[in-house]
Structure formats: C-alpha cells, structure tokens
Image: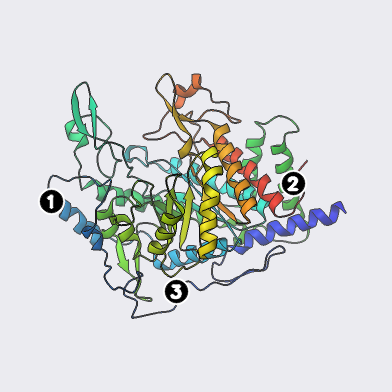
Amino acid sequence: MKISSFASTSLLLLSSITAGVDAFTPSSSALRPQTRLSVSTEPNPAASSSASSDGKWSPGSWKEKKASQMPVYDDEDELQEAVDRLSRCAPLVFAGEVRSLHEQLARACHGQGFLLMGGDCAEAFNEFNVDHVRDSFRVILQMALVLTFGSSLPVIKVGRMAGQFAKPRSEPDEVRDGVSLPSYRGDIINREEFSAEARRNNPFNMVEAYHQSAQTLNILRAFATGGYADLSRLHAWNLDFVEQSEEGSRYRKFAQKVDESLRFMKAIGVNTADDTFTKTDFFTAHECLLLPYEQALTRQDSTTGKWYDCSAHMLWVGERTRELDGAHLEFTRGIGNPLGVKISDKCTPEELIRICDTMNPNNTPGKITIIVRMGAEKLRKNLPGLIRAVQREGKSVIWISDPVHGNTRKTENGFKTRDFDKIRAELRAFFDVHDEMGSHPGGVHLEMTGEDVTECTGGISGVTEETLADRYNTYCDPRLNGAQALELAFLIAERLRLRTGLPPIE
C-alpha cells in the first residue's frame, strides 16, 4: 500500500511539472481533467482594441479620466521627449508570451493551477545587480517546487520584477524639519534622498527604468532556460533550508517526500535531464501606476489586432487607483494582458462586480485576478460576501491572497515591519473561507526577496524587533526574506495537499 501511494504521489508531481511546459498543449492529470481554453490566438483584423464594443478606447484615452497617484511634472516638453523615446524602444515582452501566461491563468481560473507572485516591494536603480535578480528568482523557483508537490497542480511563476518601480503614497509631499518636498514615489519618478534635486519628478527616470527592466528580463530569460532552473538543483537548495529546522520537523519530512519522488522518477526511467526538468516558464508583473510609461510601451499585435502593454506580461491595479471612473481602469480595460486588482475590506460586492465588468467585459477566463489584502479577521468577515457575489454573477476570476499588506505595523523604535504569524493567519483564513464557499484558492502574492534581510519578524529565520536593524535594507515596505518566504511555501503546500485528497505528511 505504501508503494502504491508513493508511486501515485510521484506521478502526480511529474504530471504537474510537465503540465505547464507548453502553455497551449493540455496534458493529462490524475486528479483533474485538463481543459483547453481559447485565449484570442486567431487573427481578428476588426479587433483594434481589447475594450468593450463602444469603440472609444485608445492607449491614451485614460487622459480623459481622473488619474490618482500620478506625479506632477514641471516640464511638459521633457515629459513628452521621454515618452517619445520610450515609444521608439523595443517592447520588453511580446504578445505571444502574454498569451501563454493567459492560457495558464485560464486553467487556474478553473482550478487547474496555482499562481505564485513574488518579488521586491519596489525595485531601485542602485540595487540592481545580477545576484539580486538571481536570488529572488531562485527562491520563487524553490517555492514553486514545494507548492507543485503539495498541490499536484502546475504553479504559474510571476515575478514582481522588471518594472516594479513606482509606489503609491498617502501624501503628495513629505515634511522634514519644516522643509516640504515631493514624496518619494519610486526610482522611476524621483529619488529617495531628501533634497530638492533628488525629489524632483524627473520624466527621464522612466527611460532609465526601461533599460534596467530590459537587463532584468535578459537575466531572467537566461536563468529560466539556461539550466539554472534544474529540478535537482532546486531540491538541493530546499534541503539547505530544511537544515535550519529541527530534527524531525514537518519541513524535513516534506523535503524527504519530494526527494523520494525524484528518485522514483529516475528509477522508472524518467529523464530528469530533459528540458521539462531543467527549464521553466517565468513571467513578470508590476503595478500599473505610472500611466505615461505604460502608454508609451503599449503596442498593437500584428497577428490579432489587439493592444498589449509590453512593459510586462501581467499588470495589476492597486487599492488606491481602482476607481470605477478613474484613469487606471480606463487604461487597463483596453489591453490584452492578464490583469489583477487589489481589494481590501473597503470593497463592496457591488463594486467588485462593476470592476470585473470594466476590466473583463467579455468574462474571459484567466483575464482577471482578484488580489485580496485585508488581514485575517476582516478577511473572514468580508471575503465570503465577495465570493458569493462573483459566484452569483458567474464571473470568471482567480482569487489569490496578498497576506502581507494588511499586516504592516510600526515598532516602537520606528521600523515598519510585518509579523510572520499574522501573515500565516491571513493565509489560513483565506483557505478556510474558500473551503467554506466551495471556491478555488488560486494563488498567493508576496513582497519578498531572496536575500537574508531582517525586515519581517518571526518565522524560522528568527528575526525579532531587536534584530530588525541588522539588515533592514528596504526602500519601501518590509519584505519577507528567503527563508520566511520558503517557510510559507511549505505551509501552503501542506494545506493544498489536504485539498487534493492526499494524506498529511506525518
């Protein structure tokens, strides 16, 4: 009986890994039938825009709406020159890549995948280097391996990278010692140093952000296809992590099961040196905030006639910019990219339905991802009503949890931080609610880094309030370090394992 169960688990892992290799070719699954979903792959000359049939959308139609969280530039000529330069640049991503992600998300929308989004709170010009990109990429791949084993589902890997520069701000200005300057809004807009020159909103920062994003994407593509994503390598890194845990811990037992599955696959003749096990799909996403940048990188696909924002494969609209009559929803409603929208307890069921109608008027599976950020208590109270409304209206959405944003606090010594236990509690609440509602908990969205920072307290890495200052490097909000992020992946994998009907690892 043990051999039968073990072989079944190994084959589930194998089918989950191979399911995402060709985004347009469905493969079998021992648990769920795979569904082929059409995502606008045929040419349609009449489709000059992805918006609804009113015909009024264009890449610049957002300018007719109120644009929240937008910087004020003091030189319109400079702004236009920067936008013109970007408009002549090559796209950072291509329509075929975007459609591949959309196809995978469409499957996740029907319970046939799990979306993992992670990366820095905000990228910075002076932090850019190959090692930084590599470390975050590595941890996301490690997490994906653990989640794949736990869920027996393909894990869609999306990095908050190659464009996550801009950040919304509560106040337009910052005051220090009686001096008022524009708030720091991310390197794509201005600089963190508190001086008039640094805080000037400089449109040419957009051009610098484009070139850094191009380098980041080159690095990511090389790592994703050049052998760095080898499954055996990822598992070895995970073993390094579990060495930090206590003897006999659930992390060690979980890793042992993955190790046994890999050995089993090799024993039955599966070639783990094949591309399926050494290469991976990896996509990028960022918040759609700085609309001149997004518009400048929007292109019309020659094969379908659709418009795509070629700054990233996926974009999301934040809690502060999702006004129904605002510029950000106006821009995103017309592009072919998969979209996300962040919602808190402030969002009503009626408002959410109107957001879905605006961003996804054709109710296309995989088009819209709802990113829930509330805190555990508010989530248990408010999320059921939102899910009920979506189910009642028959909306196709992916529900994912952002368990970090609703759990930010400031310590007595002035550090913004997030507690691991509260993050875990919100994730537990997210899964509990979906179990109660019969809906699919489709993913997780984390602010994290592969580096050994000390910005969030708790977890296996043992960060405390007293040690926050040791390596508190963030330019914006506190991030989970690599060990904390991977620990969350193990905890999520255990919960997903129960949902698939597999026994708990004891």
Between 169 and 211, the residue placed more toward the observer is: 169
Question: How many angstroms separate mark 2 from mark 3 (CA)?
Answer: 40 Å
Kind of residue at badge 3: Ser
Q: Position of residue 143 (x, y in %)?
A: 58, 46
Kind of residue at badge 1: Glu
Q: Position of residue 446 (x, y in %)?
A: 49, 43
Would you say residue 116 is visible in this rendering? no
Q: Position of residue 116 (x, y in %)?
A: 53, 51
Would you say residue 12 is visible in this rendering? yes
Task: Please identify the quarter of the rendering in which residue 328 is found.
Answer: bottom left
Kind of residue at badge 2: Lys
Q: Which residue corresponds to the image point at 42% horizontal and 65% vertical from the top-left? A: 360
Question: How many angstroms separate mark 2 from mark 1 (CA)?
Answer: 60 Å
Q: Determine which residue is flagged by label 3.
A: 40
178 lies above or below 155: above
| Left or right: residue 13 compared with residue 185 | right
Q: Earlier in the sequence, mark 3 or mark 1?
A: 3
Q: Determine which residue is flagged by label 1.
A: 76
Q: Secondary structure at mark 1?
A: helix
Residue 257 image label: 2
Question: How many angstroms separate mark 3 from mark 1 (CA)?
Answer: 38 Å
Task: Please identify the quarter of the rendering in which residue 54 is found.
Answer: bottom left
* Number of numbered discs visible in the structure rendering: 3
Q: Position of residue 66 (x, y in %)?
A: 24, 53
152 lies above or below 379: below
